[in-house]
Amino acid sequence: MKNITIAPSLLSANFYNLSDEISSLNKIFKDEKNLWLHLDIMDGHFVPNLTFGTPVLKKISNHCNMPLDAHFMVTNPFDYIEWFKDLNIHNFTFHIEATDDPIKLCLEIKKFYPSVGISVKPGTSLDFLTEELIKKIDLLLIMTVEPGFGGQGFIESTLDKISMVQKLKEKFNPSLNIQVDGGINNDTSKKVIKAGANNLVSGSYFFKTDSTMSKKYSSLIH
Ligand code: DX5
Ligand code: ZN
């Protein structure tokens, strides 16, 4: 069986009761170490939505046991590197559409964070992904919906992109995490894993459907 990590997306959690949501995740993490908490940071400019900032994330960081995975949907990712550096974030992902110099950005991020990721929107081609760049990153996030909102339907055409990245991974960076984000449930998870994804973000399926979190976790990795 493949080694799959699940990253529940806080965007779909109950914001009125975050402490219970984080405690439930911490309980699963005791037995299942392949669990990250995915944090969608939106600036209302790169995407037409706003989420949470450092005061909220500081509290979460203090109480969350699992690695924090920050997905920056922002126009100026460079400015966020220092700003967020004390939040104990494990992985810092920026959007390729938000920079002209991804190598410089990756090098700067790695000064402060253990892992750097690049995210690509459904309509953006993979031409940017040179051998030099793929060797510098720890994670490639293939958006399987348009970034900005939870609860959207999975875009099937992104499966080809996952397969393309899988081939590049084998050739240039075997330890690369291939992450997918958007419309991931117990059905689409099978398709993305088959195509090569090993790190699955799940928001509305994970937090808003019936059944327990641990059953949903298991349903996503199989
Ligand atoms: C969308 C965010 C996702 C979102 C996924 O821009 O990046 O992380 O929370 O939500 P679902 O799983 O509901 O599509
Ligand atoms: Zn996300």
Image (spheres, rainbow, N blue to C red):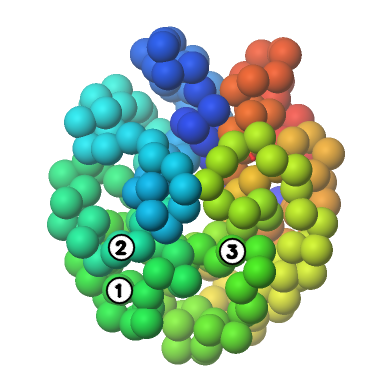
Residue at coordinates 66% horizontally, 35% vertically from top-left? 151
Residue at coordinates 56% horizontally, 66% vertically from top-left? 120
Residues at circles 1 and 2 in contact by the CB criterion of under 8 Å: yes
Residue at coordinates 72% horizontally, 76% vertically from top-left? 164
The mark closer to the camera, 3 or 1, is 3
Side of 122 relative to 40 (left or right)? right
Q: Is residue 212 visible?
A: yes
* Sequence-earlier tag: 1 or 2: 2
**Type of the residue with mark 2:** Pro
* Sequence-earlier tag: 3 or 1: 1
Quadrant in the picture for residue 171: bottom right
Q: Which residue is tagged 3?
A: 121
SS type, badge 3: loop
SS type, badge 1: helix
Question: Camera-side residue: 71 or 5?
Answer: 71
Q: Can you tell which mark lies on residue 52?
A: none
Question: Camera-side residue: 212 or 28?
Answer: 212
On the image, the x and y values in percent for residue 105 come to 30, 74
Side of 106 relative to 203 (left or right)? left
The CA distance from mark 1 to mark 2 is: 8 Å
Q: Which residue is tagged 2?
A: 77
SS type, badge 2: helix
* Sequence-earlier tag: 2 or 3: 2
Q: Which residue is tagged 1?
A: 105
Label 3, residues with CA under 10 Å away: few <14, some 14-19, many ≥20: some
Mark 3 sits near ligand 1, with its Cβ under 8 Å away: no
Residues at circles 2 and 3 in contact by the CB criterion of under 8 Å: no
Quadrant in the picture for residue 201: top right
**Type of the residue with mark 1:** Leu
The CA distance from mark 2 to mark 3 is: 16 Å
Image vertical order of residue 218 relative to residue 7, above or below: above
